[in-house]
Every structure is written in structure tokens, then in C-alpha cells.
Amino acid sequence: MAYEPQSNSSMPFGRAGELSTVARNRVLRNTYVLLALSMIPTVLGAWIGVATGFTFFAGSPLIGMVVFLAGAFGFFFAIEKFKNSGIGVALLLAFTFFMGLMLSRLVGSVLGLSNGAQLIMTAFGGTAAIFGVMATVATVSKRDFTGMGRFLFIGALVLILAAVANIFLQLPALTLTISALAVMIFSAFILVDLQRVVQGGETNYVTATLSVYLSVYNVFSNLLAMLGIFGGERD
């Protein structure tokens, strides 16, 4: 559970401000640690998915998406309910394993290319670079970016609708457009979510980690999809 300093009117203002800064830094540190830890079950899930050929209703992508969304929102509800206990952390890690399984189809497809492993490492490096830049801006910038959240949320909803439509349309140009916009939107989400922690707007590191993880996941998966299309080499 994130530490929340208690206000005390008898304290000097400077001391109270110092405690508030300590609390925010603790939430931010715990968010980074849990985010790094969440990569382990994600990689494990992706590896198992590739090895077993895991897929949700490959013959019916729409049903697969519905099942995926149902599972994801079930995890969201449970994580939010138990976010102040160790159960919330365990559920978050279970969710990241689930997301790794969902990523395995894309990873397996890219690994089928002759330079697949290189593309995966490139996507990982690009995602790490984007995260590093956004984390730095969130920490040092005096500008408040949190107001962008509502517009980014609308943009994410539009992307979801476009992705559902493209299940039926199967337009390569639309696929690339969705992936490119997703990278930009979710990169901005990383900035917004981390700045909320820095400013003290988010005091629970489990909730913060879930938000940042989803953005990082989407940046990586969409970068990988674009690299597979543009940079893939077949034997």
C-alpha cells in the first residue's frame, strides 16, 4: 500500500512539504519496481504462448476480441478492488502473464521472419527509449500534461473502434495507421500517468503500474507490428 502522509497543522510548512515529496517519490519508486517485475510474467506468458500455439478463437477474431476484453476488464475490476493489499499485486502479475499470452501470436508471427529476433529487440529498444524520454519529461518538466488525459482516452476509444472495424475491412493502410497512432497516443499516456504520480495525483502504486504497463504494452506491440510489416525479411 502506498504511504500517505498525515497532515498536521502544527508542522512547519517546509517539513510537511518534505513528507509529501517523500510519499510521492515512494509511490514512483514502487511503480518502477513493480513495472519492471511485471515484465517477467509477460515474457513468460509470451514464451509459453509461442511454444504452445496459444490463441483465442483464431477462426473468429471478433469472438476472440470479445473474450479478451471480458478477461481484461475482469482483471481490471479485481485489481482495483484489491489494490491496497498483496492480492492486488498478485492479480496484477497474473494479468501481465495473461497479456503475455495475448502477445504471443504477434511475437510468433515476427519470429517466423528471418530477422524476427532482431525486430523484437529493436521494438524493445524503441519502447525503452520512449519510456525513458517520457519518464524524464514527466519528472523534470514544469508543464502540466495531465489535462491531456481525457483527449487521449477519447483517442484510445476511437482506435479500439477502428481496430474492430478493421477485423471486417482488413485494410493494410488502416492497420498501419492504427499502429502508428497507437504508438503516439500510448506514449503520451506514459507521460500523463507518470506525471500524475510525480504530482501526487495517484497515490497507489498498483493502480499506477497497471496504467503505465498498459501503455508500455501497447507501444511495444504496435512498434513490433509496424517493424514486422516494414522491416520483415523472409527466407
Image (cartoon, rainbow, N blue to C red):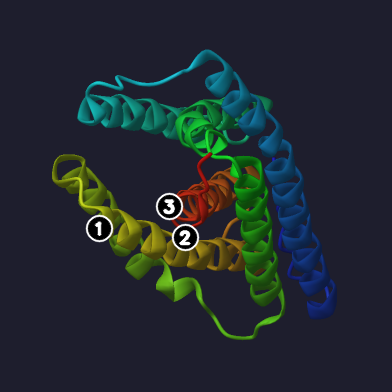
Q: Which x, y percent locates residue 98?
A: 51, 26
Residue 36, label in figure: none
x 57%, y 35%: residue:
111
- Which of the 4 quarters of the picture holds residue 25? bottom right
According to the image, label 1 marks what residue?
174
When the figure is inspected, residue 55 is found, relative to residue 110, above or below; the finding is above
Mark-to-mark CA distance, 2 and 1 = 18 Å
Instruction: Indicate the secondary structure of the residue bearing disc 2.
Output: helix
| Residue 61 picture quarter | top left
Task: Decide: few, some or many residues near mark 2? Use Cα within 10 Å; few <14, some 14-19, many ≥20.
Answer: many
Q: Which residue is mark 2?
A: 186
Residue 110 placement (x, y as % from top left): 52, 39
**Element type at mark 3:** helix
Task: Please provide percent x and percent y for residue 84.
Answer: 62, 35
Q: Pick whichever of labels 1 and 3 is earlier in the sequence.
A: 1
- The kind of residue on which mark 1 rests is Leu
Callout in the foreground (3, 2): 3
- Judging depth in this view, the residue of 83 and 70 nearest the camera is 70
Q: Nearer the viewer, residue 166 or 200?
A: 166
Q: Residue at x 61, y 63 (%)?
A: 194
Say what amino acid the circle numbered 3 marks.
Ile
Of badges 2 and 1, the one in the foreground is: 1
Q: Which residue is more in the foreground, 116 or 150?
A: 116
Residue behind mark 3:
229
Dot 1: element: helix
Q: Please tell me how many numbered marks the rendered image carries.
A: 3
Earlier in the chain: of badge 2 and badge 1, it is 1
